[in-house]
Amino acid sequence: MKDEILSAVVEVEKELAVNLANEKKKAAELIERLKAESEKEISIEEKNLHLRLNKAVSEAQTNAKEKAAKMLYETRQHTDMVTAMSDDSLKVIIRKHIAGIRP
């Protein structure tokens, strides 16, 4: 009877060892699969972030160019206006500004 019980215990221990090994293998496979999925998601997100960054930089460059072009246009307009003024008109404007500066 002791031999039968001992054999049964040994058999159960063998089954537990096999089950434990199988579960360890499954867990390792699951970890590898999750790691691969995570790396793929990170890679996709990095690509999306780079695309959004490039788009934002491009839009900022376009906006800066448009703003610079507008400023240049306005400056040229102002320059043309001042250039077209007579010396007498400019003297009047300068005297008004000087009067505002002097105490």
Image (cartoon, helix red, strand yellow):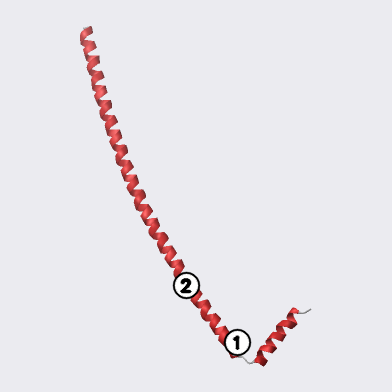
Q: Nearer the viewer, residue 42 or 88?
A: 88
Q: Which quarter of the picture shows residue 56?
A: bottom left
Amino acid of disc 1: Val
In this rendering, the answer to whether 66 lies above or below 17 is: below
Determine which of the numbered discs, if any, sits on residue 32 in the image: none
Looking at the image, is mark 1 or mark 2 earlier in the sequence? 2
Q: Is residue 42 left or right of residue 80?
A: left
Residue 42 in percent (x, y) is at 36, 49
How many marks the image carries: the answer is: 2
Q: Is residue 34 left or right of residue 54?
A: left
Crowding at label 2, few (<14), some or many (≥20) Cα neighbours within 10 Å? few
Q: Which residue is mark 1?
A: 82
Q: Which residue is mark 2?
A: 65
Q: Nearer the viewer, residue 58 or 34?
A: 58
Spatial CA span between label 1 and label 2: 25 Å
Residue 93 in percent (x, y) is at 68, 86
Crowding at label 1, few (<14), some or many (≥20) Cα neighbours within 10 Å? few
Q: Nearer the viewer, residue 22 or 64?
A: 64
Amino acid of disc 2: Lys
Q: Quadrant of the C terminus?
A: bottom right
Instruction: Identify the residue at horizontal 28%, vertical 30% (top origin).
Output: 23
Instruction: Identify the residue at horizontal 72%, vertical 86% (top origin).
Output: 95
- Element type at marker 1? helix
- Element type at marker 2? helix
Q: Is residue 97 left or right of residue 19?
A: right
Q: Which quarter of the picture shows residue 29?
A: top left
Cβ atoms under marks 1 and 2 closer than 8 Å: no
